[in-house]
Image (cartoon, coloured by chain):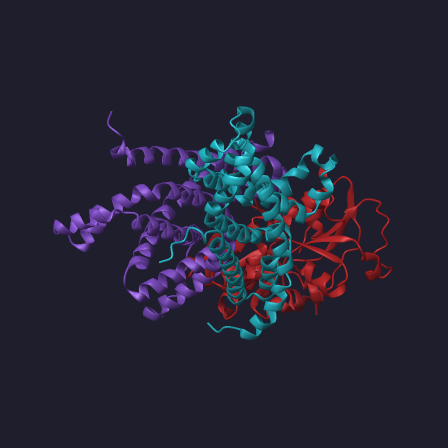
Chain colours: A purple, B cyan, C red
Amino acid sequence: MEALNGWWDDFFWGSVVVADVFVVSLILTVLFGLTGAAAKLSKNRVAQSIANGYTIIFRGTPEILVLLLFYFGSAIALTAIAQISNPEIKYVDIPPFWAGSIAIALIVGSYATETFRGAFLGVEPGQIEAARALGLSNFKTFIYVRIPAMWRLALPPFGNHMLSLIKDTALISIIGLEETLFVAEQAIATTGKPFTMFIVVGAIYLGFSTIITLSVVVLEKYANQHLKIAR
Amino acid sequence: MIFDFALIVDSIPKMLAGFWMTFELWFLSAVLGMALAIILLLMRISGRWYLYAPAMAYIYIFRGTPILVQIFIIYHGFPQLEFIRESIFWPILREPFGCAILALTLNTGAYVSEILRGGVLGVDRGLKEAGAALGLSSTHRFIYITSPIAIRLALPAYSNDIISLMKSTALASTITLLDMMGIARTIVAETYAPYEIFLSLTVIYLILTWIIQKSIGLIEKRMSRHVRSEA
Amino acid sequence: MKMIKKCLVSLSFIAAVLAVVVVGTASAEKLRVGMECTYAPFNFKNANGELMGYDVDVAKGVAGLIGADMEFVCQKWDGMIPALLANKFDLVIASMSITEKRLKKMDFSDTYRISVGRLVGKKNAGWKLFDGTGRPIVANFAGLKVGLERATTYSDWFENELPGATVVLYDSNEALYLDLVNGRTDMIMTNPMKAHLRFLSKEDGAGFEFVSPQIDEKKYFGIGVGIGLRKGNDELKGRLNAAVETLTLMGWLEKYALQYFPFAIH
């Protein structure tokens, strides 16, 4: 255990990075998921095909492969795009934090697309008709009627998506993000104690998963409170 | 950005040489994982605290930590412990293949047991009551009534998990195994051409996951032919 | 002749320093430097999270001389060159050997360290792997597992010289030593200086020793270790070369080396 001396603060900062990545990719995941679901449910053929392609590609490719592709591809692609507008630019690059967050958000977002799509289909048609009768526009219906109703149905599977997000963060260490697994590898390089260090990483992630699972339980209670039977 | 097609044509056979390793990792873990999942399921629904508490703890730990960390603990971490090196399991744990199978099995076993449990919970209570009324013992009820229906209900979620398992086999490349991902990384390291190699590997994985998905879809269609409406 | 030689040497020395200083103070540019960060004692992080090592000292020395700010980026070894080519960083100061194969895709500065390879294995294993002239005896490698890091000059040498050997490829340097100790491989090939410092002189390396002579084939290991950069940056390369020359002549390279090794390594 003394091997850990001096490394506790590094693990702490690594955990902060994990939390940061989680928040950023969570927001992006919801964004990608809602957009994808809306596209799949729309009448627009092009949007449907793009959304279908998106889910097929990102659900069928190993996460580590997506990360590596993003890491190497981002600089070249972005630089090429940036150079169209301003040829002076020598390079545009995304640091591993953003490359990784966007990559895992795209991956989990493809699963979230399916979850949200199913949940949207579960919204009672009666509520939509009522919104129409009240004169709400398509957009207002979406925001004020569909999303709140859908959210309750989507919450349990979405909780699983959140767990996937936090665990995929460990993979971003492969492209250089200095989170807990990365810290562990450096600690092993100087202390030579792999079991100790990896168990610490496992415990940290287990802690995060527990927090997320408990939060989902609380959120579910909140989302379902209007359905509680009055005694 | 010019694509080196000659390189792609040259590399695809090399990567496909790793297909057997990928398949073995996937198939063995799926089979062993299913066996483990059934054991865990029976423990979980047994109603006896000394059985379901350990099962729940196991599932909690293995679903709450990243699979990469689990792989590293088993491959890099276990040898640090004296008693592992001296146990009878050492010949298995010494080989990276054994470690990968162990990690993948333990991980997928936890997930599949929850999926099976979801299927079991979805069986209509009336059917079980009918079985009891007919005098079937609880074991018989479980084998002949609950299981077939539970399997059918669990198939969609199971197909997702088994595709996830296929994607997770790519992580075996991090512990020196030369599956398709491992060979791809070696080729990239020698030719410095990440895009061509990784993009073609993506296509290979997409084809594989598509095959798995279609196959399970066919099984599902066959199993539910008695419930699908004629419309 | 001796006087002229002396004059020439000191003149070129002064010119090098001047070139570096004059060009260097022109602008404080930012350069990103890629290194493995887990390759003690050349580039690694200590418990306080500080990046240390011979390569790090060389990088800082060069930065000071050419007037640039260096930002260090940690990168796994097998992705080092693709990352450089993909513009993830501008320089590679990671104990990367200058080889013909690499020169096809990238440029290097002059060398700042020699590079050789050596095999490490169990003590008294009784293998006869090399003949009297230092050439490997191919047949005696049969059935032995060798651990190598992916994309290194060592894996190149093995692939070409000993194609029949059973090679196990690793993502990182640390894993090489870990697996040698717990018996997953019979021997590894790596940098002898690092092997000595990090492994053989410590307790986990107690049962191991060098099982080969120092292997120095220029074709695979190159002429030494240099600073890597993308092609087409000749101006930067010139400044780097001047800086390396200064560090060599002023004895700073030796000073850096002596912090970690009992001998100079350039």
* Residue at horizontal 67 percent and vertical 64 percent from the top: C222
In the depicted structure, whether residue B196 falls above or below residue A166: below
Tell me if residue C52 can be seen: yes
User: For the C terminus of chain C, which image quadrant?
Assistant: bottom right
In the depicted structure, whether residue A151 falls above or below residue C220: above
* Residue at horizontal 61 percent and vertical 37 percent from the top: A195
**Spot occupied by residue B110 in the image (x, y as percentages of width and height):** 53, 39
Tell me if residue A169 can be seen: no
**Spot occupied by residue A98 in the image (x, y as percentages of width and height):** 40, 52
In the depicted structure, whether residue A207 falls above or below residue A30: above
Query: Disc count in the image?
Result: 0
**Spot occupied by residue A24 in the image (x, y as percentages of width and height):** 37, 47
**Left or right position of C134 against C102:** right
Q: In which quadrant of the rendered view does residue C247 lie?
A: bottom right
**Left or right position of B99 against B126:** right
**Left or right position of C61 against A166:** right
